Amino acid sequence: MEDRIPVITVDGPSSSGKGTIARLFAQELEWHFLDSGALYRLTALAAERHAIPFDDIEGLETLAAHLDVQFISDDEKGATRIFLEGEEVTDVIRSEVCGNRASMVAAVGPVRAALLDRQRAFRQAPGLVADGRDMGTVVFPDAELKIFLTASLEERASRRYQQLKDKEGSVTLGALYQELAQRDDRDKARAVAPLRPAEGAVTIDTSGIGIEEVLAKVRQLWAQAVDEKNSKRQGRA
């Protein structure tokens, strides 16, 4: 459908830069932004607070389907404040512990199904940039542009260490390396929506590349996608 709301998906493993790139490009385009990983982190946090075990599939599914969350844009800071059941948890869900628990929750098929419509509801005019692990493969398979960001495990662990060392004093680079490796294995091996590049996705290795250079590549890819779409329209005119 030519008039559908455009979507750009940015998938990839943890600390590949997908969240930063997707958020910045959404701001640049003045589009909506979906941090899909936040929904799984919120589900994991809610499960912990409501004492729902991670092997209680029915309990997790019900929790995900009725998740009481709010995403409020902070226009002055260009960020999003996240609330769970009325309490701000923006920083809480970014902890390494919450991230690992979210990876476990994300492997539960019924939870992914329960969150699918909630994610697709972010598709609003004028457009959406969505980041996650299955945005291009499952949630928005008709996206105009699909990007898969990756980086070496060593670099991703180093990035994560820099993010956490001042917030979580006990974190070590070696432990983060092992946790990311385990999370990668879990995400790639899960039966439902495993982590992989979507069909037609452009893979960008961000190892040793700065944010501005990656953004420049994304701008170029989007410009090409728009040109191709316009050319097809003109060809049918």
Image (cartoon, rainbow, N blue to C red):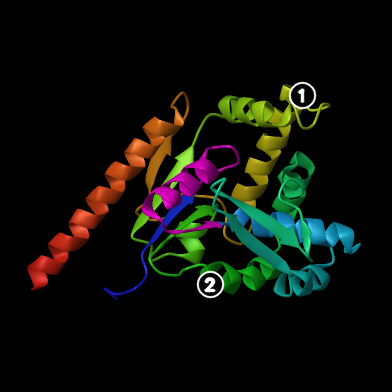
Q: Residue at x 45, y 32 (%)?
A: 211
- What is the residue that sits farthest to the right in this orientation? 51
Q: Confirm whether residue 54 shows in the render.
A: no
- Magenta residues? 12-34
User: Mark number for residue 117?
Assistant: none
Residue occupying the far front of the picture: 76
Identify the disc placed on residue 121: 2
Q: Is residue 226 magenta?
A: no
Residue occupied by mark 1: 172
Q: Is residue 105 left or right of residue 133?
A: right
- Amino acid type of disc 1? Thr
Q: Quadrant of the N terminus?
A: bottom left
Left or right of 109 on screen, residue 148: left
Q: Spatial distance from mark 1 to mark 2, Cα to Cα? A: 38 Å
Q: Position of residue 60 (x, y in %)?
A: 79, 68
Q: Nearer the viewer, residue 77 or 142?
A: 77
